[in-house]
Amino acid sequence: MKTNKTLIALTIGTLFISGCSNQESETTIAKQPENEKQAQTTIENKEVAEVEKITVMGSRLADVQTDGGVVEYMKASQPQVLMAAPAMRKRIAPPPPPEYFTQPLNQDNYLPSDSNGVFQAATTPLSTFSVDVDTGSYANVRSYLSMGQKPPKDSIREEAFINYFDYNYRVPEDKSQPFATYTELAPAPWSDERHILRIGLQGYDLPVSERKPSNLVFLVDVSGSMHDKNKLPLLVQSLTMMVKQLSARDTVSLVTYAGNTQLVLSPTKGNEKQTIIDALQKLQAGGGTHGESGIKMAYQAAKKAFVKGGVNRIILATDGDFNVGTTNIDALKEMIADKRKQGISLTTLGFGRGNYNDAMMEQLANIGDGNHAYIDTLHEAQKVLLRQMSGTLQSIANDVKIQLEFNPAHVKEYRLIGYQNRLLKDEDFNNDKVDAGEIGAGHTVTALYELTLAGNKGQVDALRYQQKQVVSASEELLQVKIRYKLPGETESKLISQVVNKQQVLNDFDSASLDFKFAASVAAFAQKLKQSQYLGSMNYQDIATIAQANRGDDPFNYRGEFVNLVELASAL
């Protein structure tokens, strides 16, 4: 009996223990989904932690090494993780240091550049200006259009558009006469009442064997505003291509400026290419923009390695943002003009968008006897620093001025297309102390005038109290005079050429291929500026003329132009 009671007790205990075990199992099963969620959350957090650190500058994202003070946002290696983790999208980063936003975003700076007006030949027979081979405006506007943006009107300089392209002028054979002159006159494509006069200068093209030794100082902006890929990284690639063309006769120094100024590379022979390239590739952006001290140190470096009888040139590469230290533009101009007289010139290369100071870059290059280019692609860097390297570095004619005198008996009105920032007083033409533009080896200069010939309807009413009719037995329409100095000389030389009535072509189609293409380029620049002088001419008309007159286009510069015109028409 006692045994049976014991068996019953054991059985009941076993059943009780079994029941508790089953309850725990059920509780475990019930809790399992929640544990799985926790595990999944842990996995996601680990994935989110595996991120790339990127720096945000303006509206762009650039892969860089982070340093103190740089804003770090989190970018997941796998985009879907961010979609699954909305908490990450709500992260709020601390504001960036003030030095990275010294200027508001999208505050590119340009000089006022209103189109030239119409003058009557009877009252203002002379037109005087300095030549200009700068092409920066065209490349800059191209970058706007390529991003689907309309460029600011003041960013458009007609002469830079026209001179961006090569024309088939005959190259002079003797450098004692550094350039040849050409004229052509035909009806304008935008008005039956107007004609276009083309004046062309072709510079002597120096063989590589005749290129003078160069003392180059690369002055590179490494401030925080230069982070973007189309700024410092493109700058380094561009100068690297140039370095590969140098020889042992050349020297390169490297000066950088940001919050402070540094001589990164003392004068180094051009055949030590890897040393120069390594110095360039180590550059990193960060800090303020102490441009003035950078320019001063660059001139010191240029003076130290000065080559008598050679090329002594500073190449300033920047987005043009000078915002720390003394930024008085007049003081900078005075210093650069003084160094120019000592034989050290200044070329400016512009990069980037957002705070690009075109006004500063153009003025400094003009004062420094250099040229200004804008580098938006490696393709453009090849054009400026490889194909046109001799012209970029070495001048063949200095202080080049052009003056036209119109015969009012045959020319009623005229208008110079472009060169607004290069106009001179009439008396400056014969004054050798007045600075003017340079022509580099192999460079071409083209200027276009819109003319109203006698017998056509003018844009300005005839004068009431002046002589109503001018009679002349001469067949001369106008005279073109050009003054220039050979490098190293202080007295100018004069050449002149007359354009007669017999040279006027009957229609636009009879003009040369280059004439018609140049006219389409001038029309495009004026159209972008919303010029009042084009009448009903539209973008398609311009593209049609350009496409029909591309001619030999080995680097597709003209083909690219046609695409830009078509792109502009859609904006």
Image (cartoon, rainbow, N blue to C red):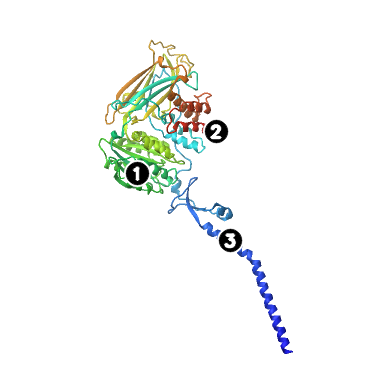
Query: Going from the N terminus, do you reach mark 2 or mark 3 first?
Result: 3
Left or right relative to 145: residue 123? left
Secondary structure state at the residue bearing disc 3:
helix
- The foreground one among 260 and 521 is 521
Secondary structure state at the residue bearing disc 1:
helix
Which residue, given by chain and number where applicable, does mark 1 sit on? 294
Q: CA distance from mark 2 to mark 3?
A: 50 Å
Q: State the mark number for residue 40.
A: 3
Residue 113: horizontal and vertical position, in percent? 44, 31
Q: Quadrant of residue 445?
A: top left
Amino acid at pointer 1: Gly
Which residue, given by chain and number where applicable, does mark 2 sit on? 570
- The foreground one among 381 and 85 is 381
Residue 383: horizontal and vertical position, in percent? 40, 36
Q: Residues within 10 Å of mark 2 (few under 14, many from 20)?
A: few
Mark 2 near mark 3, Cβ–Cβ under 8 Å? no
Q: Quadrant of residue 437?
A: top left
